[in-house]
Amino acid sequence: MPVSPDQVRHIAKLARIAMSDEEIERLVPELNNILGWVEQLSEVNTDGVEPLATVIDQKLRLREDAVTVGNIRDDVLANAPDAQHGFFAVPKVIE
Amino acid sequence: MSELTDFTIAELGDGIRSGEFSAREVAEAYNAAVAEARTLNAYTVETPEDALAAAEAADSGKSTGSLAGIPLGIKDLFATRGVDSTAGSRILKGFKPPYDSTVTANLRKAGAGMLGKLNMDEFAMGSSNETSAYGPVISPWRRAGSNVGLTPGGSSGGSAAAVAASIAPGATGTDTGGSIRQPAAFAGICGIKPTYGRCSRWGIVAFASSLDQAGPMARTVRDCAILLEAMAGFDPKDSTSLDLPVPRWEANLSSDLKGKRVGIPKEYRIDGVPAEINALWDQGIGWLKDAGATPVEISLPHTKYALPTYYIIAPAEASSNLARYDGVRYGLREEGVKTLDDMYAATRAAGFGAEVKRRIMIGTYVLSAGFYDAYFTKAQRVRALIKQDFRNAFESCDVILTPTAPSAAFGIGETTDPLAMYLNDVFAVPASLAGLPAMSVPGGLDGQGLPLGLHLIGNELDEQMVLNAGLAIEERAEFIARPEKWW
């Protein structure tokens, strides 16, 4: 299933990566090359095979619903590109 | 007396404990060696004062752990408190975590100091260290009679180069699809990826969470065992951390393989692999026989599908994990755009390099509506078959021997096609998909004087078998070659 420039533009939008038309044009054959190569999986018979998500059998643990770390607002904000009044600041969202 | 930087971690520990030399002398020797080797571009940050502080604690008797006073290099993928932790990416430039990863905290608890952060492929996506925002690491190794710059492999290329160049006695690495083992092979050192879940992923910048595992890289098998014991252990902060005691791998090292069966997978004899690599593989079989093991032919029928499976699953998980880099909470933010959406897109466009973007795009595509089942679910099903292949194989063998990589180190800029680059991990990826422990040990030099590695894959939780077989090879390969110092 080769992808078209419009599809690549759509994927870039979903991935939130700004791309010029030139970049899109360059990516189309690159992605198609990779997608064409992974296509070979279609020749594997996987009827009745359960998809593997957990590679080593283990039970997912539950923990007590308690605060284990808190009151570290300044630590959390320390790396923010823009922190104001104890909050993360972003460009205006609502006009 | 030979230089302190020539000693193994085991020897350094013995020397410090017996008072033959002080930890401070060791830290000073390494700090000086690091500063002399900047041409290699192995370190992104140097932290000499950290190494000295750990040395002081060891010399004054305040720290007595298994790594008391041992200075280590730390891959830039690990969060280290107050020290830049950027995963080799522009998007995390200047990020100083207010916490330590569990693995680095464990190493600190054992008394280790930090020499600095080690360069790597951006977000661990690469096999040559060329995708790093800091520029490529240059391998200390050169082809005989040539001064062409070679890659140390990747993604843990800074770690491999540092250990090979004796500017760290050991280093942390991470392995998602070969990122410890391939660079270890290229650099003529040892590196082990333990069973998935042995080392906590907490505080390691996530690439593909179902595959990511930390592990040590060092000059000897014994040093790897010492480091892995300190790094591993249950951590409630990682939901896939294995709640099991850490075995005493070092104390139980034994190169006597009597009664053990070594599986030789016939599907790993692939076209295009240099004859020297297959010859070394045969030599490796001979060494393990000499150690008492019996070789048995095994079949891993889905081997050829491992790489394509990996290149669906890993980018899919990466596209999801890397969604967090949005210019809001940490890292880079591109200014000068009007809306929040534009800010996200501009930040990610400026912050990610070409390979990371490529993988996010592939991952986003295979997870998108209409394609999810055909690509992602299909790959997860094939992954189950690959896992089953190994389960079947380990009914008739105790450990598997293969080459680590299909070539020796290549030159910087020589491999430009993404698919050709991905093929570097053809022998490493199947064990990653199956979550199994696997190790590279140096086996010899090729005709151009470059190191080649042998690869051991063990059954789930059987790091001991991998280490023991590695030790048997190490004792027989007598690999003592070191790169000639040109930096």
Image: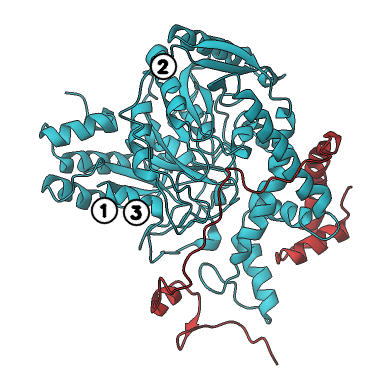
> Which residue in the structure is indicated by mark 1?
B50
Q: Which mark is residue B105?
A: 3
Choose between B201 and B2: the one closer to the eye: B201
Q: For mark 3, give the secondary structure.
A: helix
- Chain A as rendered: colour: red
The x, y position of residue A68, in whole percent, is 41, 71
Q: CA distance from mark 2 to mark 3?
A: 32 Å
Residue at 35% over, 24% down: B253
Which mark is in front, 2 or 1? 2
Which label's residue is closer to the chain start, 2 or 3?
Answer: 3
Camera-nearest residue between B240 and A73: B240
- Could you tell me which residue is drawn at 40 percent across and 44 percent down? B232
Q: Secondary structure at mark 2?
A: helix
Q: Residues within 10 Å of mark 1 (few under 14, many from 20)?
A: some
Report which residue position mark 2 lands on. Answer: B472
Chain drawn in cyan: B
Of label 2 and label 1, which has the lower sequence position? 1
Direction from residue B154 to residue B231 in the image, left or right: left
